Amino acid sequence: VLICWVGRVVAEKRPDIFANVIRRLHSQKEVRFRAIVVGAGNFEAELAGLPNTHFLGWLSGDDLHTAYASSDVFLFPSA
């Protein structure tokens, strides 16, 4: 399963919720997943150590379309 978050990685977008979801999934050993973060912001350092998570930076055009099309779950944790 590929989980995708697209957006600014800043406090008001609730990166803590994203981190909690990823950590909980990782603790469930029978759940196989990868996560991608498309975007950037001042909370990247806090998320850098999340398991199975890759930061792609800002994408646009075909690259962004591919990220969306490749994903199984979209996680938008904004407040």
Image (tube, helix red, strand yellow):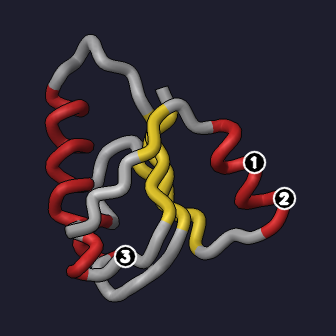
Q: Amino acid at mark 3?
A: Val
**Residue at horizontal 23 percent and vertical 31 percent from the top:** 25
Query: Which circle's residue, 2 or 3, is located before the other in the chain?
Result: 3
Q: Amino acid at mark 1?
A: Thr
Question: In terms of secondary structure, where does tag 2 sit?
Answer: helix
Q: Is residue 19 left or right of residue 65?
A: left
Disc 2 and disc 3: Cα gap in Å? Answer: 21 Å
**Residue 31 in picture, x, y percent from top left:** 30, 18
49 or 79, nearer to the observer? 79
Q: Is residue 61 left or right of residue 53?
A: right
Q: Residues within 10 Å of mark 1 (few under 14, many from 20)?
A: few
Q: Is residue 24 left or right of residue 74?
A: left
Query: Looking at the picture, does residue 25 appear above or below residue 78?
Result: above
What residue does disc 1 label? Answer: 66
**Residue at horizontal 45 percent and vertical 44 percent from the top:** 74
What residue does disc 3 label? Answer: 9
The label shown at residue 39 is none
What residue does disc 2 label? Answer: 62
